[in-house]
Amino acid sequence: MDVQTRRAKEEDLARILTIYNQGIADRIATLEVEEKDDAYIQAWFDDHQGRFQVLVAEVQQEVVGWASLNRYSARKAYDGVADLSIYVERTYRGKGVGGVLLEKLEEVAHSEQFYKIVLFTFPVNGLGQGLYRKSGYREVGVFQNQGILDGKFVDVMAMEKLL
Protein backbone atom coordinates (compact mmCIF):
# COMPACT_ATOMS: atom_id res chain seq x y z
CA MET A 1 0.00 0.00 0.00
CA ASP A 2 1.41 3.36 -1.02
CA VAL A 3 0.98 5.88 1.81
CA GLN A 4 1.84 9.52 1.17
CA THR A 5 2.14 12.18 3.85
CA ARG A 6 1.88 15.94 3.68
CA ARG A 7 1.07 18.90 5.87
CA ALA A 8 -2.66 19.19 6.54
CA LYS A 9 -4.74 21.88 4.86
CA GLU A 10 -8.08 23.37 5.87
CA GLU A 11 -9.86 21.27 3.26
CA ASP A 12 -8.69 18.16 5.17
CA LEU A 13 -10.53 19.13 8.34
CA ALA A 14 -13.72 17.17 7.58
CA ARG A 15 -11.73 13.92 7.21
CA ILE A 16 -9.54 14.72 10.23
CA LEU A 17 -12.70 15.29 12.28
CA THR A 18 -14.28 12.04 11.09
CA ILE A 19 -11.17 10.04 11.96
CA TYR A 20 -10.82 11.75 15.35
CA ASN A 21 -14.46 11.06 16.19
CA GLN A 22 -13.90 7.38 15.33
CA GLY A 23 -11.07 7.32 17.87
CA ILE A 24 -13.31 8.92 20.48
CA ALA A 25 -16.17 6.49 19.79
CA ASP A 26 -13.89 3.43 19.82
CA ARG A 27 -12.52 4.29 23.29
CA ILE A 28 -8.99 3.12 22.45
CA ALA A 29 -7.02 6.32 21.96
CA THR A 30 -8.27 9.26 24.03
CA LEU A 31 -9.98 10.21 27.25
CA GLU A 32 -12.28 12.48 25.26
CA VAL A 33 -15.84 11.27 25.75
CA GLU A 34 -17.88 13.46 23.40
CA GLU A 35 -17.46 13.64 19.66
CA LYS A 36 -16.20 16.96 18.32
CA ASP A 37 -17.77 19.35 15.81
CA ASP A 38 -16.58 21.60 12.99
CA ALA A 39 -15.99 24.61 15.28
CA TYR A 40 -13.82 22.53 17.61
CA ILE A 41 -11.65 21.08 14.84
CA GLN A 42 -11.22 24.51 13.19
CA ALA A 43 -10.01 26.05 16.47
CA TRP A 44 -7.73 23.05 17.04
CA PHE A 45 -6.29 23.38 13.54
CA ASP A 46 -5.74 27.12 13.95
CA ASP A 47 -3.77 26.30 17.11
CA HIS A 48 -1.58 23.83 15.19
CA GLN A 49 0.32 26.13 12.89
CA GLY A 50 4.04 26.90 13.04
CA ARG A 51 5.98 24.37 15.11
CA PHE A 52 2.91 22.39 16.16
CA GLN A 53 2.07 20.88 12.80
CA VAL A 54 -0.61 18.49 11.60
CA LEU A 55 0.19 15.89 8.96
CA VAL A 56 -2.19 13.72 6.99
CA ALA A 57 -1.63 10.33 5.42
CA GLU A 58 -3.23 9.62 2.06
CA VAL A 59 -3.88 6.42 0.17
CA GLN A 60 -5.00 7.00 -3.40
CA GLN A 61 -5.56 10.69 -2.54
CA GLU A 62 -7.94 9.88 0.34
CA VAL A 63 -7.00 11.05 3.85
CA VAL A 64 -6.83 7.88 5.97
CA GLY A 65 -4.99 9.17 9.01
CA TRP A 66 -3.48 12.18 10.69
CA ALA A 67 -0.83 13.05 13.23
CA SER A 68 -0.01 16.18 15.16
CA LEU A 69 2.66 17.67 17.33
CA ASN A 70 0.99 19.25 20.35
CA ARG A 71 2.17 21.63 23.03
CA TYR A 72 3.28 19.58 26.03
CA SER A 73 3.32 22.53 28.40
CA ALA A 74 3.12 26.33 28.23
CA ARG A 75 6.17 26.57 30.49
CA LYS A 76 9.24 27.89 28.66
CA ALA A 77 11.41 25.08 30.08
CA TYR A 78 9.43 22.57 27.99
CA ASP A 79 9.73 24.35 24.63
CA GLY A 80 11.76 21.44 23.25
CA VAL A 81 9.21 18.79 24.24
CA ALA A 82 6.21 17.93 22.08
CA ASP A 83 3.28 15.63 22.74
CA LEU A 84 1.99 13.65 19.77
CA SER A 85 -1.33 12.38 18.51
CA ILE A 86 -1.86 9.79 15.79
CA TYR A 87 -5.28 8.68 14.55
CA VAL A 88 -5.94 6.24 11.71
CA GLU A 89 -9.25 5.54 9.96
CA ARG A 90 -10.74 2.28 11.25
CA THR A 91 -10.31 0.27 8.05
CA TYR A 92 -6.63 1.25 7.76
CA ARG A 93 -5.51 0.47 11.32
CA GLY A 94 -2.71 -2.08 11.54
CA LYS A 95 -1.70 -1.57 7.90
CA GLY A 96 1.34 0.67 8.34
CA VAL A 97 -0.31 4.09 8.11
CA GLY A 98 0.58 4.98 11.70
CA GLY A 99 4.22 4.07 11.18
CA VAL A 100 4.50 6.27 8.10
CA LEU A 101 2.90 9.17 9.99
CA LEU A 102 5.12 8.67 13.03
CA GLU A 103 8.31 8.62 10.99
CA LYS A 104 7.40 11.82 9.17
CA LEU A 105 6.20 13.50 12.37
CA GLU A 106 9.55 12.79 14.01
CA GLU A 107 11.32 14.41 11.04
CA VAL A 108 9.13 17.50 11.43
CA ALA A 109 9.74 17.56 15.20
CA HIS A 110 13.48 17.41 14.70
CA SER A 111 13.40 20.21 12.11
CA GLU A 112 11.31 22.33 14.49
CA GLN A 113 13.96 21.99 17.21
CA PHE A 114 12.12 19.53 19.46
CA TYR A 115 14.48 17.22 21.32
CA LYS A 116 11.89 14.93 22.85
CA ILE A 117 8.43 13.56 22.04
CA VAL A 118 6.09 12.24 24.70
CA LEU A 119 2.79 10.47 24.29
CA PHE A 120 0.04 9.06 26.41
CA THR A 121 -1.70 5.83 25.47
CA PHE A 122 -3.99 3.29 27.04
CA PRO A 123 -2.16 0.18 28.31
CA VAL A 124 -4.78 -1.92 26.49
CA ASN A 125 -3.88 -0.32 23.11
CA GLY A 126 -1.37 -2.97 22.09
CA LEU A 127 -1.40 -1.95 18.44
CA GLY A 128 -0.33 1.59 19.29
CA GLN A 129 2.27 0.50 21.81
CA GLY A 130 3.78 -1.90 19.30
CA LEU A 131 4.18 0.95 16.82
CA TYR A 132 5.79 3.22 19.40
CA ARG A 133 8.13 0.58 20.83
CA LYS A 134 9.26 -0.42 17.33
CA SER A 135 10.07 3.25 16.70
CA GLY A 136 12.22 3.55 19.82
CA TYR A 137 9.78 4.90 22.40
CA ARG A 138 10.12 3.65 25.94
CA GLU A 139 7.53 3.26 28.64
CA VAL A 140 7.94 5.85 31.38
CA GLY A 141 5.16 4.57 33.60
CA VAL A 142 1.44 4.07 34.06
CA PHE A 143 -0.91 6.55 35.69
CA GLN A 144 -3.49 4.40 37.46
CA ASN A 145 -7.13 5.52 37.36
CA GLN A 146 -6.12 8.57 35.29
CA GLY A 147 -9.57 9.10 33.83
CA ILE A 148 -13.07 7.72 33.62
CA LEU A 149 -14.66 6.43 30.42
CA ASP A 150 -18.17 5.03 30.43
CA GLY A 151 -18.19 4.94 34.23
CA LYS A 152 -14.96 2.92 34.53
CA PHE A 153 -11.48 4.02 35.57
CA VAL A 154 -8.88 4.01 32.78
CA ASP A 155 -5.11 3.77 33.21
CA VAL A 156 -2.85 5.82 30.96
CA MET A 157 0.70 4.88 29.96
CA ALA A 158 3.32 7.58 29.35
CA MET A 159 5.98 6.92 26.72
CA GLU A 160 8.87 9.04 25.43
CA LYS A 161 11.58 9.23 22.82
CA LEU A 162 14.65 11.46 22.72
CA LEU A 163 15.25 12.64 19.18
Image (cartoon, rainbow, N blue to C red):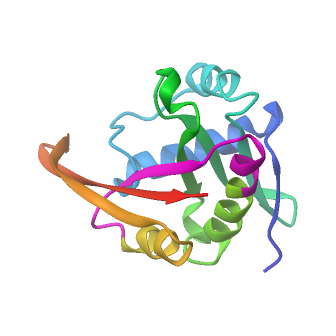
Residue 92: name its quadrant: bottom right
Locate residue 54, reporting x and y percent: 70, 41
Task: State whether residue 67 appears in this view.
Answer: yes
Instruction: Looking at this view, name the residue that lies furthest to the front.
Output: 77
Indicate left or right for 78 with 4 as reference.
left
| Image quarter in which the N terminus is found | bottom right
Q: Which residue is drawn at 60% across and 26% down?
A: 44
Instruction: Check the image and report above or below for 63 versus 78.
Output: below
Residue 123: name its quadrant: bottom left
The boundaries of the magenta stretch are 107-125
Asked whether residue 66 is drawn in magenta, I would say no
Residue 5: name its quadrant: bottom right
| Image quarter in which the C terminus is found | bottom right
Locate residue 121, reporting x and y percent: 37, 56
As rendered, which of 71 and 95 lies closer to the eye?
71
Indicate left or right for 21 with 151 as reference.
right
Instruction: Looking at this view, name the residue that lies furthest to the right.
Output: 61
Indicate left or right for 32 with 45 as reference.
left
Locate residue 118, reporting x and y percent: 47, 50
Indicate left or right for 23 with 87 as reference.
left
Locate residue 70, reporting x and y percent: 56, 36
As rendered, which of 160 and 129 lies closer to the eye?
160
Q: Residue at x 44, y 35 (%)?
A: 35
Asked whether residue 122 is drawn in magenta, I would say yes
Q: Residue at x 68, y 56 (%)?
A: 106
